[in-house]
Amino acid sequence: MATITGREEQAPSRMDATRKILARRRRNLLFPILLLVAICLVVMAGLLYWSADSLTRRDALAQEDLVKSVVQIRKEGLRQLVIDYAWWDDAVAKLGAQLDERWAREEMPAYLQANFHIAAGWLIGPGGQTVFAFENGREVAPGAAPILPEGVGEMVAAARGAASIETVPAAGFALYNQELVLVGASLVAPVHEAGEAAKQSAPTNVLVFLQPMDVTLFNRAGVGEHIANLHFRRGGVPTGYVGCPVQGGDGAMIGSIVWRAQRSGDDLLWSVAPLLIVALGAVCLLLFLAIKRVDTVVSREGRLSISLYQEKQRRSQKSTFVSMVSHELRTPLQAIGTSADMLERFGDQMSEAERREETKTIRRAVSTLARLVDDVLMMGRVEAAEDGHGREPLDLGRFCNAVWREVSVALRARQQMVLRDRIETPLPGTSDAALHTILSNLMQNAIKYSRGVGNIEVELAREGGEVVVAVTDSGPGVPPALREAIFQPYWRAREVGGITGTGLGLSVARSAARSLGGDLTVEDGAQGRGARFVLRWPLAA
């Protein structure tokens, strides 16, 4: 095949480069915004988590200190109580069955239980025997006295070594009937009779009191208002609880006082959750608006860059075209001038055949001038189409039939056009002037290079957001090595034979295609026969 436009490598590569630059610029603008928003969200989440966790830990420490304080107060209170009864002379006299043995043995246990919640008590003799015992407010015979809890023996031994009130050991914990109890022990001070020598007799007995360590003890201290589900359990602190370890009188671990962990930080997070959701929604809205704004700006800049590049390309092509047309016009004009001069000077000396030859030369030159003028007019129509606005929707199938009628009548074509229309709906915002230039050139070339053989196939389709028009002929086709060259102005292949043309048709057609924002390419026809010219341009929104 011959004259038609080959694909200029510079223009598509420049357009691709422009699109890549715009995409990179869009990423460069959006990435800092997204990164800043992500950092702010992460920092905010970290601060909230740290604040909630700090609040939870502070509350846990405060609760632990509160429980330890109550326990310490109760231990000190039991120590003081056992000291009061062990070192009180009247009480010593009663417990030693010296004074009012009935009150000491019958009424004192009930009094201690009712007023101090003392559940059991023992008076341990020097040999470890039980001298006196009571339980649940009643006296118990020494032989039937309850066994001292495990670990209390060490406390009794420590109490025997305390010769004064200041050295009485602190109360401690023990297990009594699988319940946590406080145990206090003190040496019973001996009684000095009047007139005796002022010296202290050797201590003999130890008084032991047992006080249950139940939840009501903490409720009475006001701890229950701040701590939930407080209780004693054997073993360590379970998950979801906070606790204090409990050691027996012998130093062995017997369990833990535990309570439900109140995560105040979680309450804080839940209280600010609505505000966070609102803030997150506002951030997302601002981010969406920022992304939309950036995309609008970058798209507008991209359209301006592409339009500027296309305008430069058009001006360059126009300048080149004018230069080439001016050069091409000289040749037929010179031929006309030379033939006319020959006829004027030597016409009477020429034979009839020589005069007819000069006349044919003039006519061929005039035909060439006419084709050049047509090409110039086509270029003008392309430029006018590029500047058009407010175009009406175009029925592409009907338009192709109209162009075919013009071309086939002008060229007296014997072929038929086979139209395959897969669009069937009008296309908005399409330049009919540019399409007329493209289709007229493609159909003329298809008719001329098919040499009257086969039909001309025209396919109309949509592919994604593009409109595709393909024109297939039955000619010799275009070799791959020449598919770029045929789109250069005035380029003609050697295989064109006697087919007339100026070499501008496909160059003008490609310029018109690019004015639509698309392109014109060539490929092999069906089954490798003929050439298939494919026009693509984006569908207007």
Image (cartoon, grey):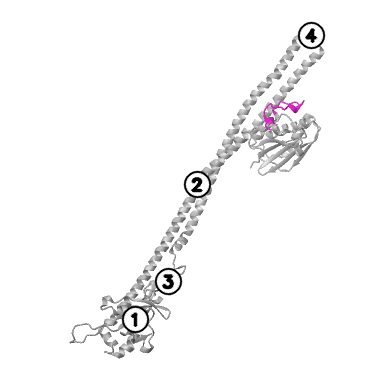
Residue 50: image tag: none
Determine which residue is flagged by label 4.
349
User: Which numbered circle lies on residue 33?
Assistant: 2
Residue 297, percent across and down? 54, 41
Q: Which of marks 3 and 4 is nearer the N terminus?
A: 3
Q: Residue at x 46, y 69 (%)?
A: 238
Q: What segment carries the magenta color?
A: 482-504
CA distance separating discs 3 and 4: 136 Å
Residue that mark 1 sits on:
209
Residue 387 visible from this viewpoint: no
Residue 483: x and y, percent? 69, 33
Look at label 2 and name its amino acid: Ile
Whether label 1 touches label 2, CB < 8 Å: no
For the residue marked with disc 1, what is the amino acid?
Phe
Q: Is residue 489 magenta?
A: yes
What is the spatial separation of the Cα atoms under label 4 and label 2, in whole angstroms? Answer: 89 Å
